[in-house]
Image (cartoon, rainbow, N blue to C red):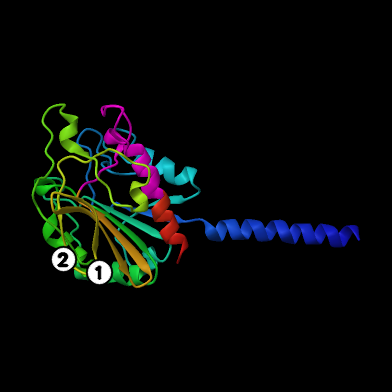
Amino acid sequence: MFKKTTIFLSMFVFGILTLNTNAQVKVGLDNWFNRETNAKTGKPYHYLWNDSAWSGYSRWGKIFTDKGAKLSTLNRPNAAVLSKINVYIIVDPDTTSENPKPNYITPEDSKAIEQWVKKGGVLMILANDGPNCEFTHLNQFAARFGITFIPKTMHPVLDKKWDMGAFTSFSDHPIFKGLSKIYLKEIAALSLKAPAKAILTENGLAYMAESKVGKGTVLAVGDPWIYNEYMDHDRLPADFENRKAAENLTDYLLKCAKKK
């Protein structure tokens, strides 16, 4: 009886561990299309998990890991690379002023990512405003999901006039649950076609969108948005809720990935 009970408990625990491992969402952050190097250190930086300066995503990465996700940093995406992740985040593809030899998004890259999304992948595209992002190839890619970034600078913020970058009117999308004020400065607006739908708008312009493509989900916003500088209140006044927005966004990305 003791042996049978021990075997049963061992199998039960093993099953739980296996279930937890299989359920862990794997989040890949691009470091191919965004591949800037710090001039002082010679190391990659800008919107990376391991960049703890204001320019990085280390705080967002911690939100993911605190919720049980596993992080990775990706080079060029292909079917084999993408098959190992559930969420893929592309941020601010390089211009030639940021990288003398940028890795533009090619038709082959676009096809691989689109097929991955259709199978259930969750894609997050965070672009940038007019002069700070490579739009030609990015838009050729994003158009597959009904999204075009408009290469202009909207929501400019002068000096410390923080409210110039405030959004205070939200749809009932889960990303904005419980929010009253977020900060998005110098952002590109979006032009949308089906299947893309606006989820954040202001004065008739779309600033954030979602597309359901096959079994997958695509979210897009024209700004890197929740990098360390504007995640908390290092600079932002206390009434901005970017961290809460980041928590909501992370929950939504993980939820979409688990529906696969």
Residue 68: percent from left, percent from top = 50, 48
For label 1, the crowd category at 10 Å Cα-Cα, with few meaning under 14, some 14 to 19 and many 20 or more, is few
The residue sitting at 8% across, 49% down in the picture is 152
Residue 29: percent from left, percent from top = 34, 52
Of the 4 image quadrants, the one containing the C terminus is: bottom left
**Secondary structure at numbered mark 1:** loop
Kindly identify which numbered label has been placed on residue 178.
none
The stretch of residues the image draws in magenta is 223-250
Of the 4 image quadrants, the one containing the N terminus is: bottom right
Amino acid carrying mark 2 in the image: Gln
The residue sitting at 34% across, 57% down in the picture is 88
Please check the rendered image and state whether residue 180 is part of the magenta-colored stretch, yes or no.
no
Q: Is residue 2 found left or right of 159 in the rendered image?
A: right
**Which of these two is toward me, 37 or 89?**
89
User: Is residue 16 placed above or below 161 in the rendered structure?
Assistant: below
Residue 178: percent from left, percent from top = 37, 42
Please check the rendered image and state whether residue 249 is part of the magenta-colored stretch, yes or no.
yes
Counting residues from the N terminus, which is met first, the one under dot 1 or under dot 2? 2
Kindly identify which numbered label has been placed on residue 140.
2
Amino acid carrying mark 1 in the image: Pro
Is residue 49 among what the camera can see?
Answer: no
The residue sitting at 41% across, 60% down in the picture is 256
Quarter of the image where one finds residue 40: top left
Kindly identify which numbered label has been placed on residue 195.
1
User: Is residue 251 placed above or below 122 in the rendered structure?
Assistant: above
Is residue 72 among what the camera can see?
Answer: yes
User: Is residue 121 placed above or below 190 in the rendered structure?
Assistant: below
